[in-house]
Amino acid sequence: MSQVHGSCDQAFAPLREILQQKIADGDELGASLCINIDGKNVLDLWGGYADASQTLPWEKEMVTGVWSTTKVITALAAHILINRGVLDPNEKVAKYWPDFGTNGKENVTVANVLTHSSGMPAFDQTISFEDYQDVERMTEHIAEQAPWYTPGSHTAYQWTNHGHMVGEIVRRVSGKSLTQFIAEELAEPLGVDFWLGVPEKDWIRTADMVPQFSLDERDASIKSIDPDSNGILTRAIRGSFLDPFSVNTPAFRKSENGAIGGYSNARGLARIGSIVSLDGTVDTKKYLSPRTIDKMLTEQISGVDLCTSVKARWCLGFALPSSQGIYPLIPDEPGIGFWGGWGGSMLIMDRGRRMTIGYVMNKMESGLMSNSNFDVYLPEIYKGFDIYTKGSS
C-alpha cells in the first residue's frame, strides 16, 4: 500500500490519517493536499499512485490536470493587469479587442467575461479535439459569434471557451500569450509548478487522470439535466470540448487553454492562491493591492446559472460561498473566493483566515464541483484551523 508522505502541523494530523485511509480503500488513486496559513504550508501531503495500474507512486513533485481550477489562475492573470491600471473590468471588451465588438457583443464588458455573464457560454458549433487546440482559430470564431442571451442578464458558465476570451484580453493588453504571462508573472516568481502546456521534459512527473465514468454516462447525465435539445445547457455542451480522457494526450498537454488546461499540484495551487488570502503580497513581493482584492471579491451577479442549473454567486473571476450555492460546505462568509475542476480539484482562498487550500487528484468523479473525498477533507480542514489558531495564540 502506498504511504502518505509530507508534513503537517499536529492540528491537522487527522487529515493525514483520512487521506491514508482514502488511498488504502481505493477512494483516492493519487492525490495531494496543501494548506497554507500566513504564507506557511501547515499541511503538505501527497500519496497514492500516478497511474491506473498503480505501478508509479505519486511523488512530491507530481502534477496532473486540474481542469476548471485553471480558471482561478487565469483570472489572477487578468487581475495583475487590472492592478496595474492597464485593464478596467468595467470597460467594454472591444476597447482592448476591437474584433470582439460585433454581432451583439458591442457592450460586453471585461467583468461580464470574468463573471460568466457574457452571453457566450460556448462556441456555437460542435468542437473537435483538433479545433480546440487551435487557440487563434477559436478566438477568431468567438469574435464573430453572437451572444445566446442578453449579456449581463444571467450567468451561463463558460465551460471551455472562458480561457480563450480572458486569454485574448490578456494578450491584447500585455502583448504576451496567456501561457507566457502566467509563467512569467505568477508561476516563476512564486517558484511553483503550474503550466498551460506542460514541458515535455516534465511529462515523466505528470500523473494520468483516470475518469470514473464513460462518455455515454456523461451524455446521459447532461440529458437528464436539460432534455431540451435546443436548451442553453445542451447547446453549451455541444459547443464545448469535454472529453475527460483527452487530458492525458500529448496534444492536450502541449496546448494553451486557460479554461481547463492547467497542470499543477496542491502545493502550487495553494501558493498561487495565497496571493488573494494574504492581501496581495507573498514573500514581500506585491502582486496585487488590497484594494484590488477588495474589488475582486465583491459580488457582481448571482442566481441560477443557465448552464449548471445551480445557484451561484460570482465575483470577478471566482465563485463566492453560499449555503444554497454550488458548494455549500465552504463557510458562507465574506472574503472567501473559490473554484474547482471537473472530477474534484479545488482552490479555496480564505482572506479572513489568511488560509489557502489546494487539492489535486487523478481519480476523477463526474461532478462539476469537488468530489466525495474533498467533501470529507474540508470540514476537517476548518476544524484543524480552529485548533491551530488556538495553539498559536
Image: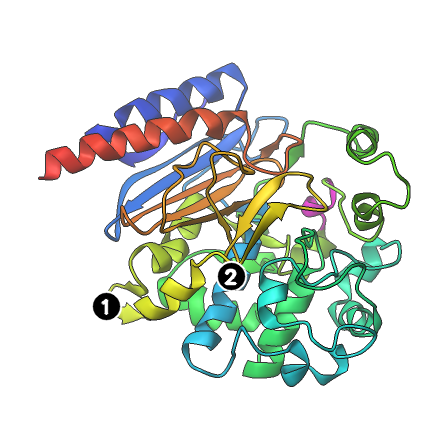
The residue shown at (36%, 51%) is 335
Task: Note whether 348 is above or below 9 in the view shown.
Answer: below
**Pointer 2 residue:** 316
Circle 1 packing at 10 Å, graded few (<14), some (14-19), many (20+), is: few
Q: Which residue is painted at 74% across and 68% down in the image?
A: 135
Q: Which of pointers 1 and 2 lies earlier in the amino acid sequence?
A: 1
Would residue 347 be found to the left or right of residue 247 on screen?
left
Please identify the quarter of the rendering in which residue 128 is found: bottom right
Q: Residue furthest top?
A: 25
Secondary structure predominantly adopted by residues drawn in magenta = helix
For the record, the magenta segment spans: 245-249
- Of tags 1 and 2, the one toward the viewer is 2
Alpha carbon of mark 1 to alpha carbon of mark 2: how far? 25 Å
Provide the secondary structure element on which disc 2 rests.
loop
Residue type marked 2: Leu
Nearer the observer, 279 or 231: 231
SS type, badge 1:
loop
- Please name the residue that numbered disc 1 is placed on: 284
Q: Position of residue 276 (x, y in %)?
A: 36, 58
Q: Nearer the viewer, residue 271 or 313?
A: 313
Q: Residue at x 28, y 28 (%)?
A: 383
Residue 25 shows in this picture: yes
Per the image, is 203 magenta? no
Q: Residue furthest left?
A: 393
> Compared to 392, does 365 lie above or below?
above
Query: Foreground: 49 or 192?
Result: 192
Q: Position of residue 49 (x, y in %)?
A: 52, 30
Q: Image check: 131 left or right of 91?
A: right
Task: Say whether residue 248 is magenta.
Answer: yes
The amino acid on which the numbered mark 1 sits, given as a three-letter code, is: Thr
